[in-house]
Image (tube, helix red, strand yellow):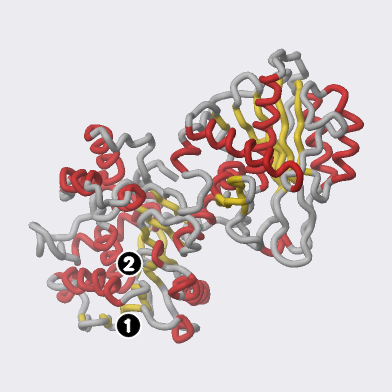
Amino acid sequence: MNEKLGPLPPDQTLGYRILDWCRDNLVQPDGEHQGERFVFTDEQAAFVTHFYGVDDRGEFTYRRAVLSRPKGWGKSPLLAALCCAELLGPVVYDGRDKHGEPIGRPQPSPLVQLAAVSEDQTANTYDLVKEMLTGPAERNHPGLDVGLTRTYSATGKLVQVTSNSKSREGQRTTFAVLDETHLWTPANGGDRLASVIRRNLAKMDGRSVETTNAFVPGEESVAEKSAEAAQKAREGKLRRNGLLYDHVEPPFEVDKTSERSILEALEYVYGDAKAWINFQRIIEEIWDPSTDPQDSDRFYFNMITAATDSWLSQPEWLGCQDSEKAIEPGDAITLGFDGSRSRVRGVTDATALIGCRVSDGHLFQIAVWEQPEGPAGEGWQVPTAEVLAAVEETFERYNVVGFYADPAKWEGHISTWEAKYGSRLQVKSSAGHPIEWWMTGGRASLTVRALEILHNAITDREMTHDGSFALTRHMLNARRRVGRTGITIAKEHPSSLRKIDAAIAATLAFKARMDALAAGVTQTKKKSRRLYRF
């Protein structure tokens, strides 16, 4: 998400009890107000109210959360405060008061873990914990023992975690912080550590908060996988969600040559933190020739940019989004199709049908069929009958003037489409095969040119798209590869779960549209206004 959270009403969350407890027991750990009562910023407090949101039965809405903000926003003090509250505060739902607002009690046997992939990172946050617990907390909680590396309460403990994941298996963790998860990768064992912590939390009905700066796509970090889970939740592909995903980046394109544009972006992403952030210093860093532009995007604007071999960056693609445009029945459109079948091993590639309006080059997702995750995906096959119905109904609703399809594994169906629709298409892949378009082989050079045309249209903003989730995801999954005939696209590796089939289909649809324009095809015919959903 990219919209800032507002606070929940008091009758929907235990969060206000946590905020009150922190104010009464913790002190400001550093800065000009060091030693004074600790107070959350408004944005931090809103996050707390959502993370501790409860339903009518007193069940927490979220089992885990991701807080993605730029460097210096105040993630570490927030983490430290939540660790203290989970060790000592009223974090367990215990009914409601006379006003109907949730009340809480302390965890009976808390095990709070502050986890990172380096000792320095855990030490940074744990040092804040030690400072926060001096004073009121020690007086209000007899038996509290704040040590150099861990803290004991009368009934539990707070510890730092950076060791081998195997040594953590089976621990009775009630709450965990996963800090800076854009750094947790398979290379350093961060993915395994995250899995072990989450299994331990599940056993104890515990919860976690993950913090991160914008991740680098393609590194397979824990932060990237959490973002993918959040995206799938928005697409309705998860049977249960339970993930609070709070990510904020500028809602507009930042002009880095304009100080005003940079300031507006920084004020948005930093929010309340502007009280202590020196924006002029950050601008100097951004304009420093030695600063990598992608680093400034990630660390200061919290923008998820692109992997070094990405075909498109997220800003390039999202800059062309126009979800307000509507495709009307009878509009002249072209279609692109990329199909797949089942796999013996791994995850089946997606099957995608993408449309493009001839008049303005607006790409829109008609349907993308993808293998579900988990048990629902076992033995899954592309629903061929549904695909065939989608193609037929699209021809009924729109004036389809061109249709290019990669025939791999769909040769028979594409031959049927050519026999049924070929005569009505005004642009054809070839005289003998009006729909069949092989992406490889003898057409490799034409494929390279088709990809170049679409890429240029996107980067020059000479097209738009509907912002559909699957199409966007597949576009950003595409990796640039240099072949004998030029630049093509591919998955990051052949067995990757990150599919690009909708990107292939979009390329074919856009190529057909350019051929239609070259042939002078612009007219539309009125069709039924019946709506189809796939």
**Residue 138 as seen in the image, left or right of residue 512:** left
Place of residue 234 in the rendered image (x, y in percent of width and height, measured from the top left): 55, 47
Q: In the picture shown, does residue 424 fall above or below 264?
A: above
Place of residue 395 in the rendered image (x, y in percent of width and height, measured from the top left): 80, 27
Marker count (numbered): 2
Q: In the picture shown, does residue 480 fall above or below 358?
A: below
Q: In the picture shown, does residue 437 fall above or below 296?
A: above
**Residue 186 as seen in the image, left or right of residue 25:** right
Place of residue 161 in the rendered image (x, y in percent of width and height, measured from the top left): 36, 78
Q: CA distance from mark 1 to mark 2?
A: 14 Å
Work out whether residue 432 or residue 503 is closer to the camera in this orientation and state it: 432
Q: Secondary structure at mark 2?
A: loop
- Characterize the local packing of mark 1: few (<14), some (14-19) or many (20 or more) Cα atoms within 10 angstroms: some
Q: Amino acid at mark 1?
A: Thr
Name the residue tied to disc 2: 90
Q: Amino acid at mark 2?
A: Pro
Look at 50% across and 63% down and name the residue there.
Answer: 220
Name the residue tied to disc 1: 155
Q: Secondary structure at mark 1?
A: loop
- Characterize the local packing of mark 2: few (<14), some (14-19) or many (20 or more) Cα atoms within 10 angstroms: many
Work out whether residue 167 or residue 33 is closer to the camera in this orientation and state it: 167
Look at 37% across and 46% down and name the residue there.
Answer: 248
**Residue 495 as seen in the image, left or right of residue 39:** right
Q: In the picture shown, does residue 231 fall above or below 211?
A: above
First in sequence: mark 1 vs mark 2: 2
Look at 26% across and 69% down and name the residue there.
Answer: 125
- Quarter holding the N terminus is top left
